[in-house]
Amino acid sequence: MRRTAYSIYSRYPILMSLEELTRMLLGEALDVKNFIEYAKTFVDRAVARIKHAVDGSHYEPVEDPLVELPSFYLAIALAQHTHSWLLKRLADREGKRASSEIMKERDVDAVNILRSLGIEVEYVGELDGCGHRVVLGRSGSRETIACFPYRTTVPRYLRYSEKLLTEPSWKLVNRIVLKGYVYLSRKDLARLAEESVKWRVLEYGRIFSERSIGELLGDYLDVVRQLVPKKVLEREVREVPKKVEKAFPPCMSRLKDALSRGEHLSHHQRFSLATFMLLVGYSVDEVVNAFRTSPDFEEKIARYQVEHLAGLRGSGKRYRTYSCEKMKSLGLCVAECSTRTPLQYYRRAVRELKTL
């Protein structure tokens, strides 16, 4: 591999998929375990990448993509098996780093990088570098101009900006729309790239989530765990003990029993149970697996919905389960528990179980 030809992968390692990388390095299709063994050579670089993500300092990639690519994916695997906070932090910092790099690129290169991330945009600033001009104001004979040198179609915009639409500035009504196109600034491109990179890092975390991968990483995980801030670990200790099913409130026990029997749950029933399970410590995979007994289960749809509730999609908001009052109004309350929320019941029950 020539460094000059592939230097872009040092700055944007996410542009080369893990499957492409394993084929290049190992000469075979995706084999995660063999890749991890190979990538261990670059563990120091991977740990450095995580350290920079944790403290928010600038990470400077080396020129050689044969170092940056494997260490990047190894960093994701290490974060995945160390702490959920660490993976999210790494995803956030990698997204912001890509965003910063996009701002420095030539127009044609920025467009090509966005396209490599699956974001189809068009450069329309060939004539004057400005593209679509918007007059923001006038002072005498001088005009204040905003330039929008890129555009994409409305359907594509709505798809690409899905995670951002809760922000007023990203709502379609607040964008420059002409003849079926939404016009974008360079900052808009950088933000779209940031969100795409964040999501891809989290997705690769899921690919690396098998326990056997964690076993391969061995003692390296102890080194990386030391990078997790003490406040995060202290909060973890204070959290409610996870998955004590004996402490489930009657409403959630009934829903989980119905689900295990293969009964069809309504939208509100699914929302209640899924959000509750996530709040008491179940992982996305565990919640998805719990719903496999549902008669209309579809893996892709279920995972998307659970990840959305967990705050991994859309606006990043982590949803809370309904209050007891809301549960009553929906006909989902099955007992008088003298609590305000199912989670409050759960915490109380856990404390009582500890005293037994």
Image (spheres, rainbow, N blue to C red):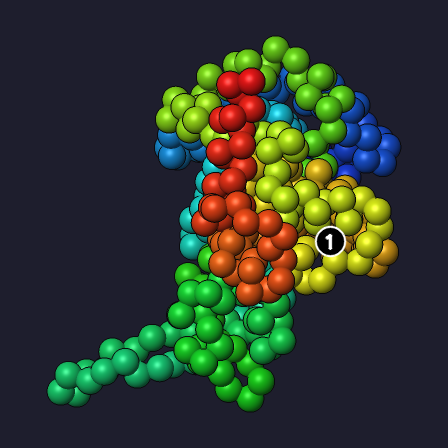
Residue in front for this viewpoint, 344 or 239? 344
Q: Seen in the image, is 234 located left or right of residue 298? A: left
User: Where's residue 146, x and y in %?
Assistant: 33, 75
Residue in front for this viewpoint, 213 or 296? 296
User: Where's residue 147, x and y in %?
Assistant: 38, 74
Amino acid type, label 1: Ala
Q: Seen in the image, is 327 located left or right of residue 35? A: left
From the image, which quarter does the N terminus lie in?
Answer: top right
Residue in front for this viewpoint, 63 or 143? 143
Q: Label 1, on which residue?
A: 302
Res. 176 visible in picture: yes
Residue in front for this viewpoint, 328 or 11? 328
**Residue appearing at x 17%, y 87% in the figure:** 141
The single residue placed furthest to the top in the displayed view is: 219
Against 172, is 291 above or below?
above
Against 215, is 185 above or below?
below
The single residue placed furthest to the front in the displayed view is: 336
Q: Quadrant of residue 143?
A: bottom left
User: Where's residue 74, x and y in %?
Assistant: 63, 27
Res. 316 visible in picture: no
Q: Quadrant of residue 176?
A: bottom left
**Residue appearing at x 46%, y 73% in the figure:** 171
**Residue appearing at x 73%, y 53% in the figure:** 302
Q: Seen in the image, is 69 located left or right of residue 294? A: left
User: Where's residue 356, x and y in %?
Assistant: 56, 18
As helix, strand or loop, the secondary structure at mark 1 comes to: helix
Against 237, is 281 above or below?
below
Q: How many marks?
A: 1
